[in-house]
Image (cartoon, grey):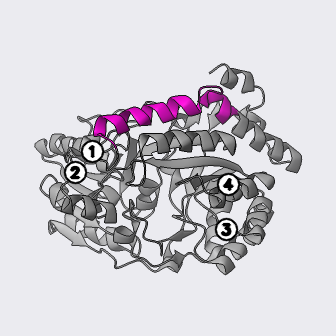
Amino acid sequence: MSHITLIFPAWPKIAEQTEFHLPPHAPVCVAADVPNTFELQFIDENVDAIDFDADTDLVLLSMMLTCQVPHGLEIAARFRKRGIVVIAGGIGVMLHADEVGRGVDSIFLGETEGGLLAGVLHDWQKGNLKPRYDYFHQFSAIDKIGPARRDILNRKRYVYRGVPMVDLVHASRGCRFNCFPCATAYLGGRRFRPRPIDKVVEEIVGIENNRLFLVDNSLAQDKKWVLELFAALKPLKRKWISHPILDQEEVVAAAAEAGCWYVYQAVFDTSDVIRNRVKRLKEYGIGVEAAVLLGPDNQSADYIKKLVDFLLEIDVDMAEFSILTPFPHTPVTAKFEKENRILHKNWSRYTTTEVCFKPKNMTPDELQEMYYYAWKSFYKDMPQSLRMARLFHSVVMREVADGTYKSQTRLVERRGQWEKG
């Protein structure tokens, strides 16, 4: 039996953010499409070390982020030096296909389901591996996508202060929106592809963890489908977080009843639209973590200060600040390239924590300083660890109320440790 090592390369964590590790989603989806005729080992380098001397017949590199690419190529080089074949895939590879292709034996572009990955592995076994498998936008039939293979995860590594981290699952793929800093339209096409709800429920029922992260690009794309999804989730009594939900009373109420715990909500201005959206979520007991992008052309240093004040005023539970970054194949990158505003393409520094372009109303150094200012000012009076503790305490109380609390998570008992940071 051939041995395959599936590796998710380490990537630099945000220094300003409390460090924790979520179980990565892409590798468990890939693993589900590796035939059981292969022995498979998974290494998430964020939590485990790579043994470069271990016996293996093939390495699969799964790279999600641009900043993973340089290090991923270093990993590939070390294995290839031993004569071991390396195949790379994932969002990061799709964004940097030609560059990655020069450093590995083969690249896979697109979704692996539907027997596509199995076909690649068959070619490798027969000595007919192609340098590129291009299934870009040749999407797998969404109703054929089955449960991810989570048994490959080392569960002990995805715990923070005794708290098991959420499991990631997707109910849909694709996004019909085309936001200017995002590459989703390039990667997945502007077509919303919802999974059959019975398939989603089947996968979630098979996940032991009571707390989930619905990693769909947006739950604001199809009202009818999303209401059907929430109705199906309600009896499961799972507690989940997600990206933005359609901002309508009926939908938010249904999300709360279905177990929505908190939402990552983009906050891009200080308008009443944002104020009312956050208010509606909180009125239904849904926490809000503001996802705030710093550096768009409408912002100045004063604007960012007012934005931070606004976040405190509307009482979001958490905030995560990111610097606008010109990732390949995004609308904003096309604009910046045309205007000669990109400072460098050192991908290892494309972490959303460093300024990589020339802002319109600030110098790069000023924007960098405002990034530090935003993190420091928002968490000045209540540290991040305590804000996070409040969110976890709220979900425990809901679980206690509906009888789904699992004492092994020890959240209530450990709250004091969270508050001490």
> Disc 3 versus disc 2: distance between alpha carbons?
44 Å
Q: Nearer the viewer, residue 229 or 338?
A: 338
* Secondary structure category for the residue under label 2: loop
Q: Which quadrant is home to the C terminus? A: top right
Instruction: Check disc 4 and give the amino acid type.
Output: Arg
Q: Is residue 387 magenta?
A: yes
Q: Which mark is residue 201?
A: 3
Determine whether label 1 and label 4 are within 8 Å by CB: no
> Disc 4 versus disc 3: distance between alpha carbons?
33 Å
The nearer-to-camera label among 1 and 3 is 1
Instruction: Check disc 3 and give the amino acid type.
Output: Val
Which x, y percent locates residue 386?
67, 29
Q: How crowded is the residue under tag 2: few (<14 C-alpha within 10 Å), some, or many (20+)?
A: some
Q: Write down the residue under mark 1.
A: 356
Which of the 4 image quadrants contains residue 387? top right
Sooner in the amino-acid sequence: mark 2 or mark 1? 2
Q: Write down the residue under mark 4.
A: 275
Instruction: Check disc 2 and give the amino acid type.
Output: Ile
Q: Nearer the viewer, residue 122 or 60?
A: 60
Which x, y percent locates residue 193?
51, 77
Q: Nearer the viewer, residue 166 or 39?
A: 166
> Disc 1 versus disc 4: distance between alpha carbons?
30 Å
Which x, y percent locates residue 361?
34, 47
Q: Is residue 328 magenta?
A: no
Which region is colored magenta?
A: 362-389
Q: Which mark is residue 342?
A: 2
Q: Which mark is residue 210?
A: none
> Disc 2 versus disc 4: distance between alpha carbons?
33 Å
